[in-house]
Image (tube, rainbow, N blue to C red):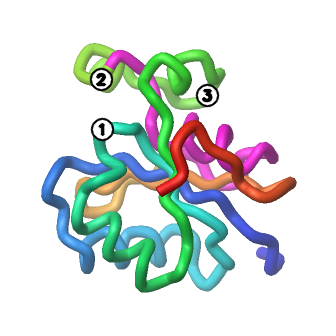
Amino acid sequence: MSRRELAVGIGIRRGTDEDTIRAAVRAVVGRQRVACLATIDRRADDSGLRAVAASWGVPIVSYPAHELARVPVPNPSARTAAALGTASVAEAAALLAGRGSLVIGKTTIHAVVIAAAVVRESPVTATDR
């Protein structure tokens, strides 16, 4: 994989710890440069996610469920749609934040869902924390 910057979409359960999130992201994206972590708005204030973002010096970009639900994704989940009002968190958030193509589809490591899209421009947000 080249050294492009990635917008990393993340789906987590509330309370997922920093080490678990960090290990899952690195297991999926390796040493690729992470431009931002992107997720659903109700998880943007999660302490584990905020700790990872702070340690890497990247923003957390978040989107409400209705914005994520409008993004076509290759791996929608009926279970996620029923629980959150969107069939995708990780893939949709990565695509919205990166504005490039999805280069890593939904991958689950230790109950953390990761996806990544190429950053075409500086990631812009519905909410940038």
Q: How many tags in the picture?
A: 3
The residue under label 3 is which amino acid type?
A: Val
Q: Nearer the viewer, residue 47 or 33?
A: 47
Measured in 3D between alpha carbons, the distance from the residue under mark 1 to the one under mark 2, in whole angstroms, is 9 Å
Contact (CB < 8 A) between labels 1 and 2?
A: yes
Residue bearing the label numbered 2: 84
Pinpoint residue 62: horizontal percent, then vertical percent: 48, 43
Residue bearing the label numbered 1: 42
The residue under label 1 is which amino acid type?
A: Arg
Contact (CB < 8 A) between labels 3 and 2?
A: no
* Residue span colored magenta: 85-106
Pinpoint residue 39: horizontal percent, then vertical percent: 44, 46
Measured in 3D between alpha carbons, the distance from the residue under mark 3 to the one under mark 2, in whole angstroms, is 16 Å
Relative to 67, residue 34 above or below: below
Tell me which label, 3 or 2, sits earlier in the chain.
Answer: 3
Relative to 99, residue 76 above or below: above
Report whether 16 appears left or right of 11.
left
Measured in 3D between alpha carbons, the distance from the residue under mark 3 to the one under mark 1, in whole angstroms, is 20 Å
What secondary structure is found at the residue carrying circle 2?
Answer: helix
